[in-house]
Amino acid sequence: MQTVNSSFNIQANNIDYTSAQLFTEAGPMGLSLVVLDSANCFSAVVCYSFPAGTQESELPEKFKEIFESEKLLQQQYSKTHLFWSFPESILVPAELMNTDRNLKMLNLVFGDAKAGVIRSDFLYKHNLHNVYRTAQTVIDVFSSFLPVATQTHMFSTMINMEIPEGNNLYAVFYNSCLSIMLCKEGKLQVVQNFDYQDANDCVFHLLNVCKGFEVPPESITLHINGMIDEKSALYAAVYKYFLNIEFDQLPEDYSYGDEVKEHPPHFFSHLFALAACV
């Protein structure tokens, strides 16, 4: 098996792990880690990106390899938080929550070829449940290495953010997929994940979401997080259709290591924002 290498590896010296918190995002796109120390400073960021087309059956071994080699995952923390980013997720009104019905709805949307553990997060602001499925083999790996981690879904953190008035489209870019959340006139419409191979695929998904919910792209503020550079072809393609673009900044109320601040703030802003969700 090909060795999994980190795409970003920023770690300050002399971190007191026993008083720090670890925040982990895990999904088919890879594994990302950030450490918040007792001084409320983000002192480490490590990101592993899996190649496009990585099969779900390959994920347990890839995650296990990272756990066995990554220094940050071999420490004892005061608290550990795990955020799943697997795309099999649906929003269910509280009054419709039912174990059998949840399974049927997931199978209807995503098919029944993949077995897994079904969990849900209650989103009290919207009176919704985010119902999602994660492969048991992946859960087993994380349970072995992070047995006491609190767990939730990345989509749940996006939905629970403060939603401003107007039309806003939030996008987190990964190496071969993106997660989006559309809010129309201040109200949540959809949260979803899409795979893409090139810039045209990415733009198609963004425009198709706008079309499906009858929101003109020119009326939208597009909020960008993740692995997209302002000088890239991907950004140039997106900018043709979305003229109101904002790159997310580093969350306030925290400090950041010097090496972290050398990178564009939006690269890791969605990871740092996880601290405000716990």
Image: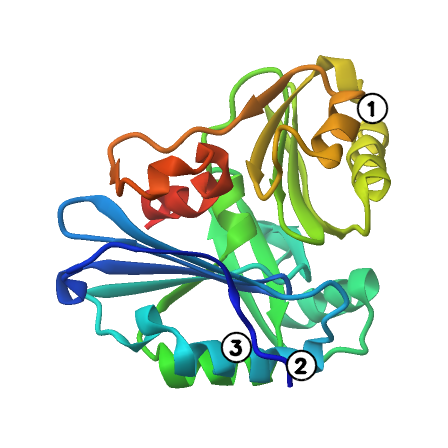
Disc 2 residue type (three-letter): Glu
Task: Indicate which disc, 2 or 3, sits on the residue closer to the N terminus.
Answer: 2
Q: Position of residue 239 (x, y in %)?
A: 74, 22
What separation in Å lies between label 1 and label 3 (alpha carbons)?
40 Å
Residue where numbered disc 3 is placed: 63
Q: Position of residue 150 (x, y in %)?
A: 35, 65
Q: Nearer the viewer, mark 1 or mark 3?
A: 3
Q: Is residue 122 above or below residue 98?
A: above
Q: Residues within 10 Å of mark 1 (few under 14, many from 20)?
A: few
What separation in Å lies between label 1 and label 2 (alpha carbons)?
39 Å
Residue where numbered disc 2 is placed: 58
Label 1: which secondary element: loop
Q: Residue at x 54, y 68 (%)?
A: 119
Q: Quadrant of the N terminus?
A: bottom right
Which dot marks residue 132? Answer: none
Q: Residues within 10 Å of mark 3 (few under 14, many from 20)?
A: some
What separation in Å lies between label 2 and label 3 (alpha carbons)?
9 Å
Q: Nearer the viewer, residue 28 or 164?
A: 28
Marks counted in the figure total 3
Residue where numbered disc 1 is placed: 214
Task: Indicate which disc, 1 or 2, sits on the residue closer to the N terminus.
Answer: 2
